[in-house]
Image (cartoon, helix red, strand yellow):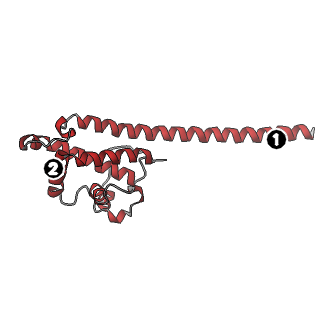
């Protein structure tokens, strides 16, 4: 009888361990899906935004003065989204693999003449806004914002004091 109780006890322990493992696995799967959904929402926002930027800007063409002026609000939104992506990576809410893809895109776009001209104008007229993007550019688009000293980002302290109710942000894995 003692042997039967020992076997039942051992089986119950194994079943509990397996149950805990499956619960942990389900939790991690749910968390990863939430992060994927969040990153997909930002990618969708980027795609929608790019529809408002003139195609020649993506083809490396300079825009005429009138076209550049008309497109400046869209470029401003692009800069703002890029800065937000950097901030979210800095906060650990964007996965490393996603960040590596995004930083290449940000660097590539800002190297295009129309983007470059708009970014230079925005930097000049916005004083200290977009501190994260300014720092990334100053670091030649190298490094990972997740590892930055937050005191080295000019707008960081201001942003932490302002409540951000615009998104429900999941924590990154």
In front: mark 2 or mark 1? 2
The quadrant in which the N terminus is found is top right
Residue 40 left/right relative to 82: right
Q: Position of residue 27 (x, y in %)?
A: 56, 40
Q: Position of residue 139 (x, y in %)?
A: 32, 60
Q: Is residue 95 visible?
A: no
Residue 71 left/right relative to 42: left
Q: Residue at x 26, y 34 (%)?
A: 48
Would you identify the image quadrant in which residue 4 lies? top right
Extreme front residue here? 60
Q: Circle 2 sits on which residue?
A: 117
Which is more toward the observer, 36 or 163?
A: 36
Would you identify the image quadrant in which residue 72 lies? top left
Q: Position of residue 39 (x, y in %)?
A: 39, 40
Pointers 2 and 1 in contact (C-beta within 8 Å)? no
Label annotation for residue 27: none
Label 1 neighbour load within 10 Å: few <14, some 14-19, many 20+: few
Label 2 neighbour load within 10 Å: few <14, some 14-19, many 20+: some
Q: Position of residue 24 (x, y in %)?
A: 60, 42
Indicate the secondary structure of the residue bearing disc 1: helix
Indicate the secondary structure of the residue bearing disc 2: helix
Residue 31 left/right relative to 159: right
Q: Residue at x 44, y 41 (%)?
A: 35
Extreme left residue here? 66
Would you identify the image quadrant in which residue 40 lies? top left
Which is more toward the observer, 96 or 159?
A: 96
From what the image shows, is residue 159 above or below residue 71?
below
Q: CA distance from mark 2 to mark 1?
A: 72 Å
From what the image shows, is residue 115 above or below residue 56?
below
Q: Is residue 45 visible?
A: yes
Q: Circle 1 sits on which residue?
A: 9
Q: Residue at x 29, y 51 (%)?
A: 83
């Amino acid at each position: 009888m003692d042997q039967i109780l020992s076997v039942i006890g051992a089986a119950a322990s194994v079943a509990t361990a397996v149950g805990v493992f499956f619960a942990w696995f389900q939790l991690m799967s749910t968390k990863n899906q939430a992060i994927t959904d969040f990153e997909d929402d930002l990618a969708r926002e980027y795609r929608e935004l790019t529809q408002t930027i003139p195609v020649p800007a993506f083809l490396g063409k300079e825009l005429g003065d009138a076209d550049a002026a008309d497109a400046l609000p869209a470029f401003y939104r692009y800069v703002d989204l890029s800065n937000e992506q950097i901030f979210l990576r800095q906060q650990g809410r964007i996965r490393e693999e996603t960040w590596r893809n995004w930083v290449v895109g940000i660097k590539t776009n800002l190297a295009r003449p129309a983007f470059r001209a708009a970014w230079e104008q925005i930097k000049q007229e916005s004083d200290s806004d977009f501190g994260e993007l300014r720092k990334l550019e100053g670091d030649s688009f190298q490094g990972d914002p997740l590892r930055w000293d937050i005191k080295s980002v000019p707008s960081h302290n201001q942003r932490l004091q302002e409540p951000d109710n615009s998104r429900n942000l999941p924590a990154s894995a």
